[in-house]
Image (spheres, rainbow, N blue to C red):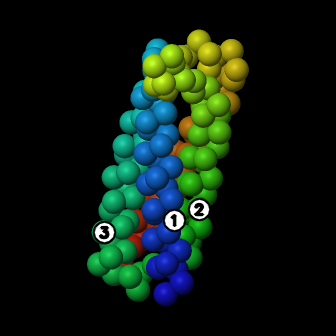
């Protein structure tokens, strides 16, 4: 039962982090291609999470500690990317938030963001494998 609660809270936290990160990337005025790729990864992650949620609701007895750990790692990677990007959001005179790639490039190197993206991709792949194991049970 504790695994089910852990998975539900993990899913909720990741969906929130994914939505916030997606919104942040959307606010980048001249985002480079690799951030557009990250948005695509986030959409795929949301699909995987929806399926995990559906499988978990259908068969809660299949919840595993491994899945809970995978969700936690995925959330950590999302947070790491958010930490790299969030400080770069600024408020315009009209109060709207905008971020420009020129500001990002001067504050962070592209490599740091790409490394975090690769770690997120790895976590997402682990979640997919966990989902396959859930479905196979």
In percent of width and height, residue 94 lies at 46, 19
To which residue does mark 1 refer?
A: 10
Instruction: Give the CA distance from mark 1 to mark 3.
Output: 14 Å
In percent of width and height, residue 54 lies at 30, 69
Is the C-beta separation of discs 1 and 3 under 8 Å? no
As drawn, 63 above or below 78: below
Front residue (pair 108, 33): 108
On the image, which quarter does residue 114 sit in?
A: top right
Work out whether mark 2 precedes mark 3 in sequence or the reverse, and give the earlier one: 3
Q: In what element is the residue under mark 1?
A: helix
Residue depicted at 46% across the width and 15% down the height:
30
Work out whether mark 1 precedes mark 3 in sequence or the reverse, and give the earlier one: 1
Q: Which quadrant would the C terminus be assigned to in this image?
A: bottom left
Instruction: Give the CA distance from mark 1 to mark 2.
Output: 6 Å
Left or right: residue 85 compared with residue 41: right
Residue depicted at 59% across the width and 40% down the height:
82
To which residue does mark 3 refer?
A: 54
Is the C-beta separation of discs 2 and 3 under 8 Å? no
């Amino acid at each position: 039962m504790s695994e089910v609660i852990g998975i539900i809270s993990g899913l909720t936290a990741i969906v929130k982090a994914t939505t916030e990160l997606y919104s942040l990337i959307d606010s980048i005025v001249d985002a480079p291609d690799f951030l557009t790729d990250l948005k695509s990864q986030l959409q795929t992650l949301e699909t995987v999470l929806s399926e995990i949620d559906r499988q978990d609701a259908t068969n809660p007895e299949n919840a595993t500690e491994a899945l809970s750990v995978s969700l936690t790692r995925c959330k950590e990677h999302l947070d790491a990317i958010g930490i790299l990007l969030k400080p770069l959001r600024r408020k315009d005179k009209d109060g709207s938030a905008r971020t420009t790639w020129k500001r990002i490039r001067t504050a962070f190197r592209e490599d740091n963001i790409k490394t975090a993206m690769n770690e997120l991709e790895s976590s997402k792949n682990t979640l997919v494998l966990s989902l396959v194991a859930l479905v196979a049970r």
